[in-house]
Image (spheres, rainbow, N blue to C red):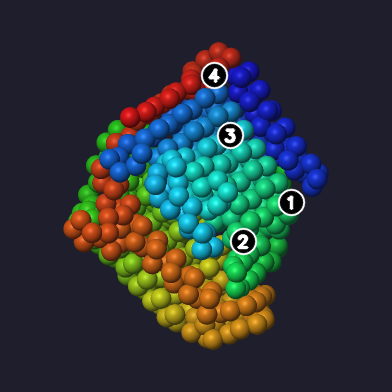
Amino acid sequence: MKKLSDLRERIENRVNVNLREMDFDVRPFLQALVPLEQFAKFYAFYGLTPYHPLHFHFSNSTMAGSYFLGKCVVEHSMIYKSDIRGDELKSKHDDFLFDGLKIPLHDDEVIHIKDSFLIKTLVHNFSHDPEAPEEFLIQNTASLPYANIHGSPVEGSFLGPFSTIDLTTVHDTVIGEFAYLQTGEMAHHYVAPGQIWISGPHFDFKYRHDPQVLARYVRQEPGQRTEGEFIDFIESRESDFEEVFNSVTISRDLDIPAGASVSHYAVVKGECTLGENVLVAQRAYLENAHLGQGANAQENCYIIDSRLAGLNVTAHGVKIIRADMGEKVFVGFNSFLRGRAQAELKVGGGCVVMPHTIVDLEEAVEVPPGTLLWGFVANAADLAQNSMPLSELDKMTGDVIHGKMIFTGSGHEFVHAFSHRIDHILEANGAYWRGEEKRGHAQSSQDISFNIVQPYPEGDLKGMYPTIDIRP
């Protein structure tokens, strides 16, 4: 496995050069999490549909257990059990709008991963960098388990486990575990673990999880595996995914109605029911779950013993356990919502659960309709400190401090931005599909075929993939 070892060293050195100002060394993290032998054990696979431009180019790389869709180029990189989902990339002759400027594209956009190490990472959406609208670049970057790179070109950076960069161009930055960043651009910065930071032209939202509370759920030390309840929760269900990834066909006793789709690479257990236009993505997990019309479960989502009324946006990495979710509830990236048999969770319609929120109940809690929810909630007192009616925030201007949350700017602009984004996500997912109108991911995913590629099984090249160029 000499070539594989050399490749890892090359990536480590390139990332470390970018992070030298912060004296940050990625090597202990990358060498502890995935033994090199693992890269020879799993195939990679890519999807073909009639709706997405086709071009896959893989060279001097390893891609064990990873999934690709849309135009993707991978060079000198190690990608392990990651989802590179290019179904929202911009198309040739589209106009990219930025600050009132119309930027026409001269080619289809491509996800370009170079000199990077991605471990169980989700890459989705399209580049929001106006300086390079045709290329969604991930370069000289290391990303740990269950991080999300969402519409965010990134170079020379480190993403801790369960972190998210969202619609933000990131350079030479360290992002701690379970941190969420949506600021448009970030360079030469250290984002603390559990920091939630959303910044727009007219508002700024900040909250940071208590480090001692966060350590119970996720913690990452150099030279150690990722630990905490989030990882324990996922690993206890890994065997269910092994079955679907090892099977060419899956037999499910599940009625899939018109306009809905369930990925071959999703787990469905127990009594599950789906409404029309539901989207269940690969690596999603459903158990005794009801998803009403237009609801979705994105990659790395777990919905267990729960009911979603309909038009629910369940973003990448969300876990919902023993909860009753009202209609059109938005739950942001990597949020963890857990009710219990004697501590039920009810979330009213029209609520917005901020990304990286933790609700882990010790008593029954009911979130009123139209509420903004963030932070950590275990009981009614926590709910009072970590929530606010959206209608109240809509009227606020200036500085607002509510518990540990700090908001600055126009509440109206903040509420309007979230409302617009939720509708955009629902439309993109196909929740509003009627016949041939408003086709989205749920409908396009019905016509998809999967093709697998294998690594070298032995020798110096063991675990590496041959150079592959796949075109129409």
Q: Kindly report the distance in space between the C-alpha atoms of the residues bearing marks 1 and 4.
A: 36 Å
Answer with mark 4 or mark 3, whichever residue precedes in sequence: 3
Q: Kindly report the distance in space between the C-alpha atoms of the residues bearing marks 2 and 1.
A: 14 Å
Answer with mark 3 or mark 1, whichever residue precedes in sequence: 3
Dot 1 falls on a residue whose secondary structure is loop
Q: Is residue 227 visible?
A: no
Dot 2 falls on a residue whose secondary structure is loop
Q: Which quadrant would the C terminus be assigned to in this image?
A: top left
Q: Kindly report the distance in space between the C-alpha atoms of the residues bearing marks 3 and 1.
A: 20 Å
Residue kind at label 4, given as amino acid type: Lys
Residue with the mark numbered 1:
188
Are the residues tagged 4 and 3 within 8 Å (C-beta)? no
Answer with mark 1 or mark 4, whichever residue precedes in sequence: 1
Task: Point out the frontmost of discs 1 and 4.
Answer: 1
* In the image, residue 271 above or below residue 253: below
Task: Point out the frontmost of discs 4 and 2.
Answer: 2
Name which residue lies at 48% across and 70% down: 418
Residue with the mark numbered 3:
114
Q: Kindly report the distance in space between the C-alpha atoms of the residues bearing marks 3 and 2.
A: 24 Å
* In the image, residue 402 above or below residue 325: below
Residue furthest top as drawn: 459
Residue with the mark numbered 2:
183
Residue kind at label 1, given as amino acid type: His
Where is residue 350 drawn, in percent x and y? 41, 76
Residue with the mark numbered 4:
462
